[in-house]
Amino acid sequence: MNNVSTSEIVNRVWNYAHVLRDEGVGYGDYVEQLTYLIFLKMSSERAESGQGGESLAAERWAKLIELDGSDLEMEYRHTLESPR
């Protein structure tokens, strides 16, 4: 996503929001989940650049990006439910 413009990212985010809304997910829930994913991604970037060291959030992001489909959903649910 390095060569994607800001407007393209915004359009993607809103398109996902509309899909989730149509599936019964409210915008508040969507924003909460999106914020958490952005936090994981930023933590990973900080760890990679040496600014933040290794963190649990960075490790969780690394696990998530390796998966797709039902495996991704299960790991994401596990990530949300884990106390640490």
Image: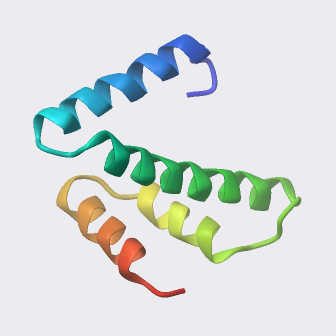
- In the rendered structure, the answer to whether residue 41 lies left or right of residue 83 reads right
Q: How many marks?
A: 0
Return the x and y of residue 74 as percentages of the image width and height: 25, 69
Q: Quadrant of residue 84?
A: bottom right
Residue drawn at the location 20% of the way across and 46% of the way down = 25
Seen from this angle, which residue lies furthest right?
51
Return the x and y of residue 40 as percentages of the image width and height: 58, 58
> Which residue is more in the foreground, 43 or 50?
43
- In the rendered structure, the answer to whether residue 72 lies left or right of residue 69 reads right
- In the rendered structure, the answer to whether residue 80 lies left or right of residue 23 reads right
> Which residue is more in the foreground, 14 or 44?
14
Residue drawn at the location 55% of the way across and 28% of the way down = 1
Seen from this angle, which residue lies furthest left?
23
Vertical order, 44 against 81 (above or below): above
Q: Quadrant of residue 21?
A: top left
Q: How is the image coloured?
A: rainbow
Vertical order, 40 against 19 (above or below): below
Return the x and y of residue 27 as percentages of the image width and height: 32, 40
Vertical order, 43 against 53 (above or below): above
Residue drawn at the location 43% of the way across and 52% of the way down = 32
Residue drawn at the location 67% of the way across and 51% of the way down = 42
> Which residue is more in the foreground, 17 or 75?
17
